[in-house]
Image (cartoon, helix red, strand yellow):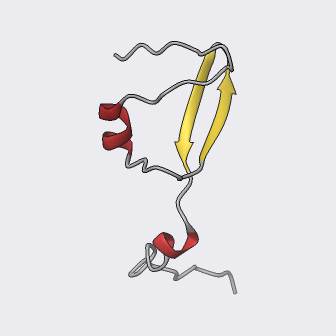
Amino acid sequence: MATVTVSPKSQIVIPQKIRESSGIVPGQKVQMISCRSQIRLIPIEPMENLRGFLKGIDTHVEREG
């Protein structure tokens, strides 16, 4: 578990181990969600990185009649 300090400007630094394990790089945007007493940071992937991630998925849908 990492501990960070909020600066006088309400800023924090994401520790290196967490950035690396989450794949967060400088300049990347993250979504911040408040859930109960927790704050969650979710890295936003550029659309270019998502191209082809559904390749091979079964799109067959059983239909009635």
Q: Quadrant of residue 65?
A: bottom right
Residue at image coords 55%, 35%? 41
Q: Quadrant of residue 19?
A: top left
Residue at image coords 31%, 41%? 21
Q: Quadrant of residue 61?
A: bottom right
* In the rendered image, the vertical position of residue 39 relative to residue 23, given as above or below: above
Q: Nearer the viewer, residue 64 or 23?
A: 23
Horizontal and vertical percent position of residue 5? 51, 12
Horizontal and vertical percent position of residue 36? 68, 16
Residue at image coords 34%, 16%? 1
Horizontal and vertical percent position of residue 8? 66, 13
* In the rendered image, the vertical position of residue 49 relative to residue 59, given as above or below: above
Question: Which residue extends farthest bottom?
Answer: 65
Say left or right for 1 vs 9. Answer: left
* In the rendered image, the vertical position of residue 29 relative to residue 36, given as above or below: below
* In the rendered image, the vertical position of residue 32 relative to residue 34, given as above or below: below
Horizontal and vertical percent position of residue 23? 37, 49
Q: Nearer the viewer, residue 3 or 62?
A: 3
Question: Which residue extends farthest front?
Answer: 8
Q: Nearer the viewer, residue 54 or 19?
A: 19
